[in-house]
Amino acid sequence: MRRSANAVHGPIADAPAEIAISHRDVLGEGFRRYERVWVAPAHGPGAGRPHDLLRAGAAAAVLPVDLARDEVVLIRQFRPAAQLANGKGELVEIVAGHVEPDEAPAAAARRECVEEIGVAPEPLIELFSYLTSPGLCDEELTLFLGVVDAARVPARAGAAADHEDIVPVRASIDATLAAFLGGAIHNGPLIVALQWLALNRGRLAEIVRTGSASP
């Protein structure tokens, strides 16, 4: 007999798990740390089961929008993992980066905008946070809407200290959403941002005026 799914009683929401991490082993150390963590029931015996994961931590991303021109500002840069995955390493992406220790996500979002598209957003409005790939890493990304003047965006950008070679891309919102719907875009944070944009495009002026994306 096929078992039915559990019925939900109460709000649908993530919840704390009753587990204990008995110990951690560092498997590799580079730009990010690769760890094996041993997870067991909080009140159970033994060391538990091993789980290998990448410790990426907090990140911030920005969807830069020019309301006057009805444009978005994206970036293009090479990603070796994308090249290995599908042979298309020149990804179209959203502004994003790691949140440094003792740095607020909003501060990181502003810094990344200046580094990757050459302009600071004003205003910058927090939208929501999500886990980018919880089966593989602990990265939690906070997404922001940023209002920019697309005419001030340079032809190339990127932080020299990080050896970044980034090409900012100005595009109409219509063309960007069409590319997304046509399957031409594969970067996860950008896809999430464009899904939000498609749902909230008619509210952009109100969101910017109030400084809040809440309905």
Image (cartoon, grey):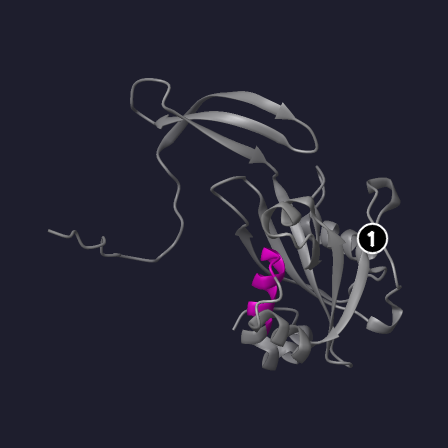
Residue under the point 61% across and 53% down: 142
Q: Where 129 falls versus 168 (above or below)?
A: above
Taking 184 as reference, is 203 above or below it?
A: below
Task: Tell me: 110 left or right of 193.
Answer: right
Q: Residue 9: give x, y in percent of width and height.
A: 25, 56
Amino acid marked by disc 1: Glu
For the residue pair 107 and 197, the one nearer the viewer reads as 197
Q: Is residue 95 visible?
A: no
At a point 82% along the width and 72% down the height, the residue shown is 150
Q: Which residue is mark 1?
A: 115
- Do we see residue 75 in this rendering? yes
Q: Residue 76: where, in percent of width, then height?
A: 75, 58
- Secondary element type, mark 1: helix
Tell me where residue 8 sits by quadrant. bottom left
Q: Residues within 10 Å of mark 1 (few under 14, many from 20)?
A: some
Residue located at (66% from left, 51% from top): 60
Seen at 74% across and 74% down, the residue is 171
Q: Which residues are magenta?
A: 186-197
